[in-house]
Amino acid sequence: MTVLLPTTVSHEGVKASYKIGVLEAKMPKLMKDDRKKVDMEFH
């Protein structure tokens, strides 16, 4: 079985458990570093 997720997840920190016929999976979102470097000059 394949499940498509709406966002990218990190491979680290994935946890899963199976109890009484229920599979619970926890996957942390992969955080993008959206910061940009801006060069500024002060006079």
Image (tube, rainbow, N blue to C red):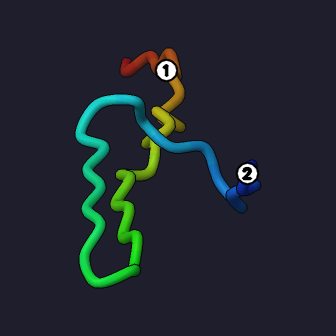
Query: Residue at image x 53%, y 28%?
Result: 36
State the SS at label 1.
loop
Q: Is residue 21 toward the left or the right of residue 18 in the image?
A: right
Query: Residue at image x 65%, y 54%?
Result: 7
Where does residue 17 sit, x and y in percent of width and height?
A: 25, 62
32 relative to 28, above or below: above
Q: Amino acid at mark 2?
A: Met
Residues 38 and 18: in front is 18
20 relative to 12, above or below: below
Where does residue 33 sit, x and y in percent of width and height?
A: 46, 33
Task: Find disc 1 in the rendering and name its residue.
Answer: 37
**Marks 2 and 1, the one that precedes in the sequence:** 2
Where does residue 13 sit, x and y in percent of width and height?
A: 23, 40
The Cα–Cα distance between marks 2 and 1, rounded to whole angstroms, is: 42 Å
**Total number of numbered discs in the rendering:** 2
Local packing at callout 1 (Cα closer than 10 Å; few below 14, some 14-19, many 20+) is few
Mark in the foreground, 2 or 1: 2
Q: Amino acid at mark 1?
A: Lys
Task: Find disc 2 in the rendering and name its residue.
Answer: 1
Q: Is residue 13 toward the left or the right of residue 34 in the image?
A: left
Residues 32 and 28: in front is 28
Do the residues bearing badges 2 and 1 touch, measured as CB atoms within 8 Å?
A: no
Where does residue 24 sit, x and y in percent of width and height?
A: 36, 70
Residue 18 image-quadrant placement: bottom left
Query: Residue at image x 49%, y 20%?
Result: 37
17 relative to 14, above or below: below
